[in-house]
């Protein structure tokens, strides 16, 4: 066990956990930030995507000891009131079915648009290909990413 | 207006009012139960000071806000929006003044709270509208009494009660208190379809905001003071059971509380149809946090032993059935050999029309083709999980589960606690697809909680989830057609089977359209458990049948849509046999709509089209799939889909479901496969089990509904089965090669 001071969603949080604990479980079990989801635990599905220093990473394979003082953003901290352009686009297109994969999809899409505000269709596909949606909302996800890109560029 | 007798008594409505008593709505909903302050923030409308319960499904606030309790479990169909729409329509209230809350499990108040078989909206269509209509009548009655005017003169619309002659009006909120005291009317009038203002108009998912902000709403999100985390260890192979466990090393790991053995069924318990469980004896490990339990689980020393063969009686939807569970460790090679053996033998005759034997003898040409598909794992994105807290002889459950009522007798028997002492919340499910109808994990959580005397959240790892069983079975079908010298179809013979069940629907199209027809089936016993998987059996038969019809049409030199329409004309005008389970006219209607919307018959350079149609779950669905070849790889450019599911309650949500069914089907047809070696599932996680990803999804999907006034039929499942056929037929047109064995894409292209 060790104590870690983490910078999450603009707040400092302290946790006392095994240094090898993946951030996924730190968030879910210890900080009650349950928007970040467990889907595979081996970096294959993207359900656990969060931002680390502005980059989308898989929280299931990111140990708490590797975080240091880098800023973490989770789905709960993406915006104040569901008004991040990606969230707004998601609501507009009404993307979710079961919804379980969607926080991970949104975090991945938000990071994509930060780096590439005007992605082509194939760039969207490439960036989103690591995120599984078992319900099959891919066409809506793509539409929402395009819409978010348009809205931020206009 | 339709006059309908109310079947719901006042007593049933007022029995348990604790649920509806004032204040914010608790439970899993957008106003997250765990964080009320967040709920206030998110509410776009002001909360009323007081709520008045009108019936079990709704309460009205003094300011006119309406809370609607939606009865069924949600796993992505968006019934938490469409079911309240049914109530709001008849109540005649402004949709923006509606708050949706999840009803708890309560069969007396909410009937059969079952999400599956595409029956949700179909079964709730009338009862939920009646719940809204009775409330509207009571509000009108309240106004009539208050204003001392005749009831017939009161109108109720958009949340407003009016009496034109006396120029009096009041919001529903003002009359709610009086209305809540009135008796339930004996009869209510339901609206005519033409008067609908909410049903048939797309409404956004009421949970979308909660989803995109990561609110707690899924079973696995559940947190409770003092809650422990549990995991199970099940046998590594089918055909094995628990011998002994040594938990010493695991218990010595940090954060670990206990290692316990559990037994899911009491001896002599009569199983229901959803009590399927290959591994009723398990080891559970319990600790403070998920990560600690995961680590300690690796330290468990468990001895497993082979099972002995047994026979059991299952009392399910189809009555009592006896099934044989053989001992031994099965491998895919053995499955395939068995399939080959049984497919070559005569099957059990299920239906015969005319004289197929004679027709085949006389045939100038016989086409025979065989189709197969492997086992599939459901792979819902949210692995199985359940919260349970057993205190003395009281039980609290919160678990993602498709049929709460059917697991209650099992929980009660296993715990030795009366069924009426079991309370259940119904959180959202992160996918279900049939898998979460088999709630063994809820029984396990309850047994663990009882043993360790603490609230427990049981979490399956992805590996536990994928290797636990209850798969889509592996299937096989052989179709034979006899053609005469003029290339006319004179007989059709289908023989289908699977492990451990047959997928055959003997009375479905093209049965009824062919004078000489015969259908046979076979099955092989197995100890690998199977269960419902989105459109059970149809999800294989549609692909086989529709690919065969395509090949048949080609051989006969006919356009594939025209060929189907000719058969349907025959089935409509002069049907063969009496048990045909489809309506030939609706079936033809959906094909005609598809032909128009897909602009069938036009050719686009390098675009290869495949068509397919199917009837299941009381609805009709058909697709045209457009494919191009890019560097030798098939790319699905577009799927045009036509559906006849009667009245569509929430069109955009229904389209979302159809899009999902199409993508899900393409994924499973191309990649879905679970294999076994000596009883051990060969895929355990998504690095091995290939799922469809965005790059492989169609670039576009357009969904069209047949417009009619038929009461709603199934929607979640019907568009799924036919896409397998549309894909196979397009693949043939694109590659010149017919695809008979799923999965169609053998090469693995896994992206992490
Ligand atoms: S849970 Fe992290 S990628 Fe699947
Ligand atoms: S919406 Fe269900 S997994 Fe994506």
Image (cartoon, rainbow, N blue to C red):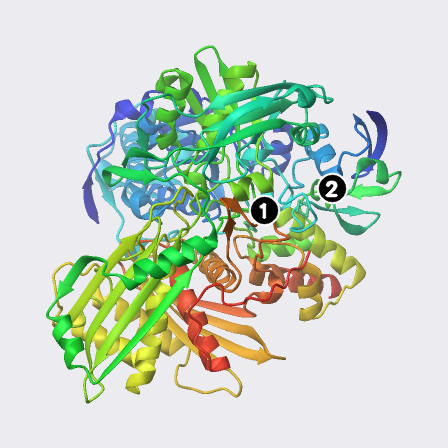
Residue tagged 2: A77
In whole angstroms, how far apart are the C-alphas of marks 2 and 1? 33 Å
- Drawn side of residue B322 relative to residue B725, left or right: left
Bin the neighbour count of mark 1 within 10 Å (Cα to Cα): few under 14, some 14-19, many 20 and up: many
Q: Position of residue B14 (x, y in %)?
A: 33, 22
- Drawn side of residue B73 relative to residue B344, left or right: right
Q: Which mark is residue B684?
A: 1
Which one is nearer the viewer's eye here, B156 or B50?
B50
Quarter holding residue B394? top left
- The residue lying furthest to the right in this view is A69
Which one is nearer the viewer's eye here, B674 or B39?
B674
Q: Position of residue B339 (x, y in %)?
A: 36, 58
**Helix, strand or loop status at disc 2:** helix
Rendered view: B247 above or below B304: above
Tell me if I can see residue B668 in this picture.
yes
Q: Position of residue B269 (x, y in %)?
A: 33, 24
Q: Is the CB of mark 2 within 8 Å of ligand 1?
A: no
Rendered view: B110 above or below B511: above
Rendered view: B614 above or below B129: below
Bin the neighbour count of mark 2 within 10 Å (Cα to Cα): few under 14, some 14-19, many 20 and up: some
Q: Quadrant of the C terminus of chain B?
A: bottom right
- Pinpoint the chain carrying mark 2: A
| Mark closer to the observer (2, 1) | 1
Rendered view: B231 above or below B364: above
Q: Pointers 2 and 1 in contact (CB under 8 A)?
A: no
């Amino acid at each position: 066990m060790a104590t870690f001071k983490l910078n999450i969603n603009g707040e400092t949080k302290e946790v006392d956990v095994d240094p090898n604990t993946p951030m996924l479980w730190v968030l879910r079990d210890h900080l009650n930030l349950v928007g970040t989801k467990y889907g595979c635990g081996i970096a294959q599905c993207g359900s656990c995507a969060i931002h680390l220093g502005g980059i989308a990473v898989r929280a299931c394979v990111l140990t708490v000891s590797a975080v240091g003082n880098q800023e973490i953003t989770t789905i709960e901290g993406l915006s104040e009131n569901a008004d991040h352009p990606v969230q707004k686009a998601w609501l507009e297109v009404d993307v979710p079915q079961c919804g379980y994969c969607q926080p991970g999809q949104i975090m991945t899409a938000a990071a994509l648009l930060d780096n590439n505000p005007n992605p082509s269709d194939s760039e969207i596909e490439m960036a989103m290909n690591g995120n599984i949606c078992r319900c099959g909302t891919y066409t809506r996800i793509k539409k929402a990413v395009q819409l978010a890109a348009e809205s931020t560029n206009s | 207006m339709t006059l309908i007798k109310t079947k719901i008594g006042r007593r049933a409505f007022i029995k348990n009012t604790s649920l509806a008593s004032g204040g914010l709505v608790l439970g899993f909903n957008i106003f997250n139960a765990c964080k009320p302050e967040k709920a206030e923030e998110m509410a776009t409308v002001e909360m009323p000071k007081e709520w008045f319960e009108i019936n079990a499904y709704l309460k009205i606030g003094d300011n006119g806000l309406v809370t609607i309790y939606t009865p069924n479990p949600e796993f992505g169909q968006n019934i938490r929006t469409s079911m309240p729409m049914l109530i709001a329509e008849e109540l005649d209230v402004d949709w923006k003044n509606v708050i949706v809350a999840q009803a708890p499990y309560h069969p007396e108040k909410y009937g059969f709270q079952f999400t599956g078989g595409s029956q949700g909206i179909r079964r709730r269509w009338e009862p939920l509208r009646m719940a809204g209509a009775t409330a509207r009548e009571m509000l009108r009655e309240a106004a009539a009494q208050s204003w001392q005017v005749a009831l017939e003169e009161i109108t109720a619309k958009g949340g407003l009660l009016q009496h034109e002659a006396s120029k009096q009006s009041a919001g529903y909120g003002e009359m709610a208190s009086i209305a809540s005291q009135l008796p339930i009317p004996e009869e209510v009038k339901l609206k005519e379809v033409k008067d609908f203002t909410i049903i048939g108009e797309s409404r956004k998912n009421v949970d979308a905001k909660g989803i995109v902000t990561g609110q707690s709403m899924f079973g696995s999100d559940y947190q409770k003071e003092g809650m422990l985390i549990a995991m199970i260890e099940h046998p590594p192979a089918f055909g094995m059971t628990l011998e002994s466990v040594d938990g010493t090393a695991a218990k010595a790991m940090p954060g670990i509380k206990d290692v316990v053995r559990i037994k899911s069924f009491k001896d002599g318990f009569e199983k229901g149809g959803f009590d399927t469980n290959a591994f009723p004896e398990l080891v559970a490990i319990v600790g403070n946090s998920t990560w600690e339990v995961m680590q300690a689980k690796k330290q468990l020393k468990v001895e497993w032993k082979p099972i002995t063969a047994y026979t059991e009686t299952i009392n399910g939807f189809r009555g009592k059935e006896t099934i044989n569970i053989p001992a031994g460790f099965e491998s895919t090679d053995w499955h395939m050999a068995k399939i080959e053996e049984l497919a070559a033998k005569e099957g059990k005759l299920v239906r015969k029309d005319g004289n197929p034997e004679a027709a085949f003898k006389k045939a100038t040409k016989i086409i025979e083709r065989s189709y197969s598909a492997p086992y599939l794992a459901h792979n819902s994105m949210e692995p199985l999980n359940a919260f349970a807290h057993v205190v003395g002889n009281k039980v609290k459950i919160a678990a993602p589960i498709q049929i709460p009522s059917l697991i209650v007798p099992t929980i009660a028997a296993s715990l030795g606690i009366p069924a009426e002492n079991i309370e259940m919340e119904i959180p959202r499910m992160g996918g279900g697809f049939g898998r979460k109808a088999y709630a063994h994990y809820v029984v396990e959580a309850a047994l663990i909680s009882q043993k360790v005397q603490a609230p427990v959240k049981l979490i399956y790892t992805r590996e536990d989830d994928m290797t636990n069983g209850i798969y889509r079975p592996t299937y096989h079908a052989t179709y034979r057609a006899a053609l005469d010298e003029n290339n006319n179809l004179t007989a059709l013979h289908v023989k289908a089977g699977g492990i451990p069940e047959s997928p055959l629907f003997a009375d479905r199209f093209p049965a009824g359209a062919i004078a000489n027809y015969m259908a046979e089936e076979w099955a092989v016993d197995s100890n690998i458990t199977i269960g419902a998987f989105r459109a059970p059996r149809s999800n294989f038969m549609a692909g086989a049948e529709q690919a065969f019809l395509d090949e048949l049409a080609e051989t006969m030199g006919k356009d594939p849509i025209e060929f189907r329409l000719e058969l349907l004309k025959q089935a409509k005008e002069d049907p063969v046999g009496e048990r045909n389970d489809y309506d030939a006219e609706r079936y033809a209607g959906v094909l005609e709509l598809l032909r128009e919307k897909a602009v069938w018959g036009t050719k686009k350079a390098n675009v290869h089209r495949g068509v397919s149609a199917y009837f299941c779950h009381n609805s009709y669905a058909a697709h045209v799939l457009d494919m191009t070849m890019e560097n030798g790889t098939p790319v699905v450019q577009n799927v045009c889909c036509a559906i006849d599911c009667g009245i569509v309650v929430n069109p955009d949500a229904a389209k979302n479901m159809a899009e999902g069914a199409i993508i899900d089907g393409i994924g499973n047809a191309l990649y879905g496969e679970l294999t076994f070696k000596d009883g051990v599932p060969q895929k355990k996680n998504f690095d091995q089990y290939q799922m469809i990803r965005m790059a492989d999804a169609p670039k576009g999907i357009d969904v069209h509904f047949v417009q009619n006034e038929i009461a709603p039929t199934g929607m979640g499942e019907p568009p799924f089965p036919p896409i397998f056929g549309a894909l196979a037929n397009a693949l043939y047109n694109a590659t010149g090669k017919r695809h008979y064995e799923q999965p169609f894409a053998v090469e693995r292209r896994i992206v992490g």
